[in-house]
């Protein structure tokens, strides 16, 4: 399984990851429409966090033993049996925010202006490489095979 | 070899899942007194509000029992436990033997002896049946009195308001949600509730339920302890639950308020486990076992119990009072000790932007987080929960945790690295 690795020492804080994540999760997949026209406004699922001089992008780590899945009240947050990815079913989600309470990365967002429920990184299932990684100009985000523990 | 689980909600379901991860073979029987136990109880307010259909409320898929090869005995009740002979006895006298037993019977709502309690229009709010009964009754422009301003009371009030019912909440203490919020946070949500038309009466309780003038068998109002009379069409009791420990009464299983378990969810009797609301589980803030009637805690405990029952060693990572809520348009996450009583022992940092209704409070003891409340800016709650659960010393950056621009990047690099390498320990992984 491939996961996004974060290298904060290479992050310049440019924010392209957020921009391209937003476009990828927009309806139009068009940067101009996504930013200027679409309602509800698309939401980035990667979060660029900064505390000078540190900056890096953080998104759902797709934990092996995900606390958000344990805590989920509705069953919307679940782990895909085959891929091991943490999958969020937005039609099942009620937006109770319990997953947000236990995500140690703060990687789950409240999509209040959109779906009204939570949103998080889905590793861009339709792309070979997630949009944030593909558009990171300095390899601060890398999409790599990781070997699970055990 | 047979596993028997009593109770099919968050804990029972968690145990079925972890047992099957380890042991796909042996017999697994689950007995629930509900007809469709695999629904999400916290979602009954969404159901009553009309925001979630019955289908949407299903916590697990319809084929959950089948897929996990669980012999589900739904709508059945265990009436007796014979721990010496290792038998559970059902209401139709069927006896089922077990090698490993999990008691996950939960709690049932407290309905105190009150005059007029048997009138039509008196409800509780714990199960889907409660919600269905209430949904069949509650109509627009009716009036409801909700007794109790805790989590259940607020959730039923929110749903009733959505249905167009005028709600009055009667809370015995000086503020709503007093167990999980401080005065300032309670005030914020209280203001929003009042803006939605809810009347909040504190320091009072209901003394008598009175009948209607034209029909004394139906609820017409309530009389408070101060003598005030409030007219209403329905009364909902939401003052808490008593734990369903009755099955272990008279057995060797040790109870306090709930069934006492160790970190592996094991009771003092060999091969007998307990989890969920009925158990007293380890609270990492207080360092002792407490009743923590919360869905995630129950599910976590159920998973841990299941692993241990199936022969894998797993430990409950500790819970604490922890609630996320979204009612009346206010989002709140509140964890641990947020109302410290002994001021000297604790350090408190607060940031309150009253214009934006954003409130953040951190409580520390010996430079370790023991509680926090976030109102309306809650996305970073999980980072705080991680620091808190990991018992990390936050001396050098604790005060920054309430600032607007606090983020994962603000944490010291060693903590950050450890988090990215190891993740959280608030998990159920067996050894």
Image: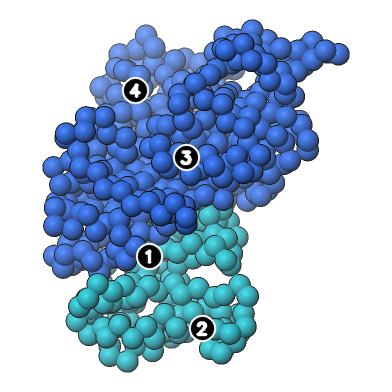
Chain colours: A cyan, B blue
Subunit of label 2: A
Helix, strand or loop for disc 3: helix
Q: Earlier in the sequence, mark 3 or mark 4?
A: 3
Q: Residues within 10 Å of mark 3 (few under 14, many from 20)?
A: some
- Determine whether B141 is above or below B253 in the image: below
Q: Earlier in the sequence, mark 1 or mark 2?
A: 2
Between circles 3 and 1, the one closer to the viewer is: 3
Q: Which residue is mark 1?
A: A107
Mark seen at residue B259: 4
Q: Which residue is mark 2?
A: A23
Helix, strand or loop for disc 2: helix
* Distance (Cα) linking label 4 and label 1: 36 Å
* Distance (Cα) linking label 4 and label 2: 52 Å
Q: Position of residue B56 (x, y in %)?
A: 63, 51
Between circles 3 and 4, the one closer to the viewer is: 3
1 and 2 marks on the same chain: yes
Subunit of label 4: B
Q: Is residue B415 left or right of residue A28?
A: left
Helix, strand or loop for disc 4: strand
Q: Residues within 10 Å of mark 1 (few under 14, many from 20)?
A: many
Subunit of label 3: B
């Amino acid at each position: 399984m491939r996961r996004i690795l974060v290298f904060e020492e290479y992050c310049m804080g440019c924010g392209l990851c957020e921009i391209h994540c937003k476009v990828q999760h927009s309806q139009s997949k068009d940067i101009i429409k996504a930013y200027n026209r679409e309602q509800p406004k698309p939401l980035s699922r990667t979060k660029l966090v900064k505390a000078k001089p540190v900056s890096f992008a953080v998104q759902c780590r797709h934990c092996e033993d995900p606390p958000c899945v344990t805590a989920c009240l509705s069953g919307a947050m679940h782990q895909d049996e085959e891929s091991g990815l943490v999958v969020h079913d937005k039609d099942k989600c009620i937006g109770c925010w319990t997953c947000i309470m236990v995500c140690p990365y703060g990687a789950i967002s409240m999509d209040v202006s959109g779906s009204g429920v939570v949103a998080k990184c889905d590793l861009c299932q339709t792309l070979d490489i997630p949009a944030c990684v593909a558009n990171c100009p300095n390899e601060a985000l890398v999409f790599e095979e990781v070997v699970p523990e055990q | 070899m047979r596993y028997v689980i009593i109770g099919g909600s968050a804990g029972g379901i968690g145990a079925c899942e972890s047992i099957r991860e380890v042991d796909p073979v042996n017999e697994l029987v689950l007995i629930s007194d509900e007809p469709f136990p695999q629904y999400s109880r916290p979602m009954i307010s969404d159901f009553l509000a009309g925001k979630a259909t019955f289908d949407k409320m299903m916590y697990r898929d319809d084929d959950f029992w089948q897929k996990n090869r669980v012999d589900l005995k739904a709508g059945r009740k265990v009436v007796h436990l014979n721990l010496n002979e290792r038998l559970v006895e059902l209401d139709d006298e069927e006896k089922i033997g077990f090698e490993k037993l999990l008691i996950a019977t939960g709690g049932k709502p407290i309905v105190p002896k009150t005059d007029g309690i048997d009138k039509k229009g008196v409800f509780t709010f714990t199960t889907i049946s409660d919600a269905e009964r209430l949904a069949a009754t509650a109509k627009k422009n009716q009036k409801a009195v909700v007794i109790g301003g805790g989590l259940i009371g607020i959730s039923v009030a929110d749903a009733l308001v959505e249905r167009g019912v005028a709600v009055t909440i009667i809370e015995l203490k000086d503020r709503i949600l007093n167990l999980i919020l401080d005065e300032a946070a309670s005030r914020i949500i209280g203001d929003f509730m009042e803006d939605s038309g809810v009347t909040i009466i504190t320091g009072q309780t209901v003394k008598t339920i009175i009948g209607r003038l034209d029909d004394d068998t139906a609820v017409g109002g309530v009389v408070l302890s101060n003598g005030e009379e409030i007219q209403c069409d329905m009364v909902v009791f939401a003052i808490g639950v008593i734990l369903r420990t009755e099955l272990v009464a008279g057995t060797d299983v040790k109870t306090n308020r709930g069934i006492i378990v160790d970190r592996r969810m094991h009771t003092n009797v060999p091969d007998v486990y307990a989890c969920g609301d009925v158990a007293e589980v380890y609270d990492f803030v207080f360092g002792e076992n407490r009743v923590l009637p919360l869905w995630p805690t129950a599910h976590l405990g159920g998973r841990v119990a299941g692993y241990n029952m199936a022969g894998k060693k797993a430990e409950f990572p500790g819970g604490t009072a922890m609630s996320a809520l979204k009612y009346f348009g206010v989002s709140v996450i509140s964890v641990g000790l947020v109302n410290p009583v002994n001021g000297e022992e604790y350090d408190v940092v607060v940031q309150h932007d009253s214009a934006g209704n954003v409130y953040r409070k951190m409580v520390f003891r010996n430079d370790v987080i023991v509680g926090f409340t976030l109102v309306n800016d809650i996305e970073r709650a999980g980072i705080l929960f991680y620091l808190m659960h990991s018992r990390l010393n936050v001396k050098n950056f604790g005060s920054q945790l309430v600032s607007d621009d606090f983020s994962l990047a603000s944490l010291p690099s060693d903590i950050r690295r450890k988090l990215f390498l190891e993740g959280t320990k608030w998990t159920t992984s067996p050894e």
